[in-house]
Amino acid sequence: KFLKANESPWNGVTIGMGGSGSMLSLFNELRVFIAVTFLVGLLISPEPMGLSPAQAETFACAHRGDTEAAPENTLPAIQSAVEKGASQIEFDLQLTKDGRLVLMHDLTLKRTTGQEGKVGDYTLDEIKQFDAGAWHSEKFERTPIPTFEEVLEIIPHDILCNCHLKGGPEVGAAAARVVKELDRLDHCFLAATIEQAEAAKEIAPDILICNMSRQTAPHTSYAEQTIELGCEFIQLLGSKENLKETVQHLHDHGVQVNFFHGNNEEDIRALIAADVDYILTDRLDLCLGLLETQEGER
């Protein structure tokens, strides 16, 4: 349904020229120049622009930030992931009672703040009073729950933001609004259900989408749905059966693949071998180390 956002804006466009000889000559020269430029480009770069059909490299995605170093979904965890060199950072977004987006994974606040209830039961001012760090370690006592805007302030444009939406379509609309207003469409994508994505596209038609509608095996029909919808990303989890073939098929259609998750050496190496684009990991140091080793072996 939201494929139209990816269609070429040049469909059906024609260019008219005058009938003079000089204009015709200029037009012919221009055609030759374009043709030569195109052929030279093919010689210099044998693969098409954009995602290569055979993705050559795998990268690390810090799941909820660098959670070994700091509490999940907090600014210290995000900052640590940035400093260590994560290529993508995943975090979870929920709406407060007064419509602000904050980072929180669980449906309730209990595990990470000790508070009762849900994010949507409180205003942003109330949420900001909660301690989201003490559960992790004494070092992070009084660490607040960050807003979406605060997180985007510390993530540079060369790192992908994997914004996992929690809630209904209204979360998609709210997230798209923030991404658009802060001019972050170039490196933020929404990990969303179809309903959330449709709401987001109403606000920002060009926003990038990671299909999260059904992540588990079998991957084949899920991959086809993602291609048909025109999503730029897909998240897979669980089974690695026929994973390399599925990844190749997705790459052939310009879809990048996130896989949840790789938290040990065996799984990380298997995901690298399958040409997965981004490995969501809770062990960022391990993943980055293995990726560096793998790159040196290529």
Image (spheres, grey):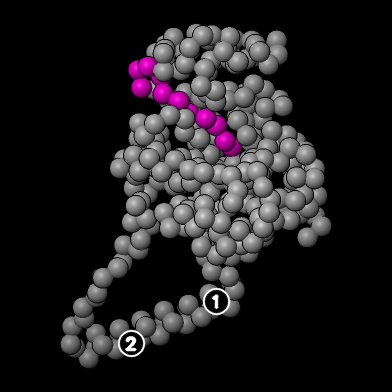
Q: Residue at x 61, y 58 (%)?
A: 246
| SS state under label 1 | helix
Asked whether the viewer can see residue 57, the reply is no
- Where does residue 62 sit, x and y in percent of width and height? 64, 36
- Residue 95 on the magenta segment: yes
Q: Amino acid at mark 1?
A: Leu
Asked whether the viewer can see residue 8, the reply is yes
Using the image as rendered, state which of residue 79 and residue 260 is in the foreground.
Answer: 260
**Distance from Cα at disc 1 to Cα at disc 2:** 21 Å
Q: Residue at x 54, y 23 (%)?
A: 106
Using the image as rendered, state which of residue 219 and residue 114 is in the foreground.
Answer: 219
Which residues fall within the magenta stretch?
89-99
Residue 28's label in the rendered image is 2
Q: Amino acid at mark 2?
A: Asn
Magenta: main secondary structure equals strand
At label 1, counting other C-alpha atoms closer than 10 Å, the crowd grade (few under 14, some 14-19, many 20 or more) is few
* Marks 1, 2: nearer the viewer: 1
**Seen in the image, is 203 located left or right of residue 39?**
left
Where is residue 120, by image quadrant? Answer: top left
Residue at the far bottom: name it.
Answer: 21
- Where does residue 131 sit, x and y in percent of width and height? 57, 10
N-term mark: 1 or 2 = 2
Residue 216's label in the rendered image is none
At label 2, counting other C-alpha atoms closer than 10 Å, the crowd grade (few under 14, some 14-19, many 20 or more) is few
- Residue 23 on the magenta segment: no
Using the image as rendered, state which of residue 119 and residue 145 is in the foreground.
Answer: 119
Q: Residue at x 47, y 53 (%)?
A: 226
Where is residue 261, by image quadrant? Answer: top right
Q: Is residue 45 above or below residue 80?
A: below
Q: Tell me the quadrant of the picture where the C terminus can be found.
A: bottom right
Q: Which residue is mark 1?
A: 42
